[in-house]
């Protein structure tokens, strides 16, 4: 093992020039990985490869020149340029390392101009929204490069806006078109059936499907027709009223109990159908026969046009 004397003799043999060269070698060797590491930061600092390769070339050429026996016979030729010695090592190594480092140099992100959706767009972003071409529904816009977005309005917001718009109906080739009065833009098509559901019609056609007339005593039940789902019963006569009730054939339940004055009529609904019941003739106090009332029943058919 070398003793303290050996260490002392080595340090004594180092000149001031040697110490400067050693410091330069250490610094330039450290600079190479440190400058390269700056490329891979979250926000990279792209030091050019030629700068990093020169630092490493300085370290290697200084090491060879001072401590590894010299480099007198080394040479580097580039076209008409030919250098020898330390300069050849420095230039040659820097040339080679520059080409290797360029393979790993990150590509800088393209620079985008600053963008403000509110001020850089005409018309103002508050006055429009984007829609899907197939469904017409609002879509959300994102400008990722500028970290901005244009959110789609909700259906509640749109409905509030639409309530203030005035629309009109126009007929075109048998179809009802909904048109915006402000812009004459076609909003959509409306089926005739939809208008009928709301009770808006050009006209109403009413038809009666009559059944036979029957004569009733003061208390009597009669089945007018097998096609009717109910029977009719009289519940007595008093003054000018004919009291009656209508019962379901299915379960005997009373569907209607009422009275008709003189030769009046009533309309009632059962199973989505409307019926007219009328007393067309009556005599509640005859002298030679029993009291009677003649009922007329008809099914009402309504067609909306």
Image: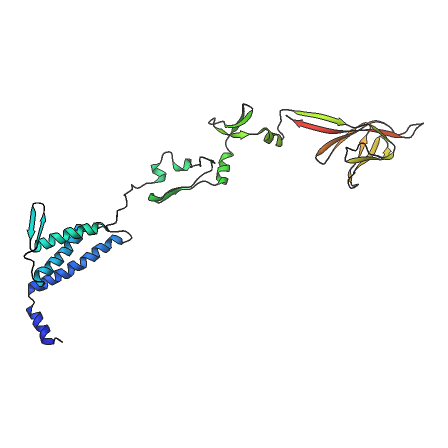
Residue 154 shown left or right of residue 273 in the figure: left
Q: Residue at x 55, y 26 (%)?
A: 175
Q: Quadrant of the N terminus?
A: bottom left
88 or 117, nearer to the observer: 88
Colouring scheme applied when the structure was drawn:
rainbow
Most extreme residue toward the top is 173
Q: Position of residue 112 (x, y in %)?
A: 29, 42
Q: Nearer the viewer, residue 300 or 149?
A: 300
Image quadrant where one finds the C terminus: top right
Judge left or right: residue 141 versus residue 239.
Answer: left
The answer to whether 216 is drawn above or below residue 74 in the figure is: above
Q: Is residue 81 above or below residue 275?
A: below
Q: Position of residue 238 (x, y in %)?
A: 86, 33
Q: Locate residue 1 relative to residue 156 in the image: left or right.
A: left
> Which residue is at the front of the view, 168 or 65?
65
Residue at image point 33% right, 37% down: 120
Residue 164 higher or lower than 30, as above or below: above
């Amino acid at each position: 093992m070398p003793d303290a004397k050996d260490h002392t003799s080595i340090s004594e043999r180092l000149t001031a020039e040697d110490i400067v060269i050693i410091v330069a070698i250490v610094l330039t060797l450290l600079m190479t990985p440190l400058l390269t590491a700056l490329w891979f930061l979250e926000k990279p600092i792209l030091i050019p490869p030629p700068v990093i390769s020169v630092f490493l070339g300085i370290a290697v050429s200084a090491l060879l020149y001072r401590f590894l026996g010299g480099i007198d016979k080394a040479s580097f030729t580039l076209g008409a340029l030919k250098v020898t010695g330390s300069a050849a090592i420095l230039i040659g190594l820097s040339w080679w390392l520059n080409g290797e480092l360029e393979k790993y140099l990150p590509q800088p992100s393209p620079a985008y101009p600053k963008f403000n959706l509110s001020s850089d767009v005409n018309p103002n972003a508050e006055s429009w929204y984007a829609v899907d071409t197939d469904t017409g529904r609002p879509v959300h816009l994102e400008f990722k490069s500028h970290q901005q977005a244009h959110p789609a309005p909700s259906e509640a917001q749109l409905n509030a806006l639409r309530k203030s718009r005035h629309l009109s109906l126009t007929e075109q080739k048998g179809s009802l078109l909904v048109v915006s009065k402000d812009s004459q833009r076609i909003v959509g098509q409306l089926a005739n059936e939809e208008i009928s559901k709301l009770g808006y019609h050009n006209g109403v056609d009413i038809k009666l499907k009559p059944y036979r007339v029957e004569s009733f005593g003061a208390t009597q039940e009669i089945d007018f027709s097998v096609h009717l789902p109910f029977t009719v019963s009289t519940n007595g006569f008093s003054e000018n009223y004919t009291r009656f009730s209508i019962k379901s054939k299915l379960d005997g339940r009373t569907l209607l109990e009422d009275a008709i004055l003189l030769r009046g009529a009533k309309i009632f609904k059962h199973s989505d159908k409307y019926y007219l019941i009328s007393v067309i003739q009556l005599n509640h106090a005859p002298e030679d026969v029993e009291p009677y009332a003649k009922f007329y029943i008809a099914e009402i058919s309504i067609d909306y046009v």
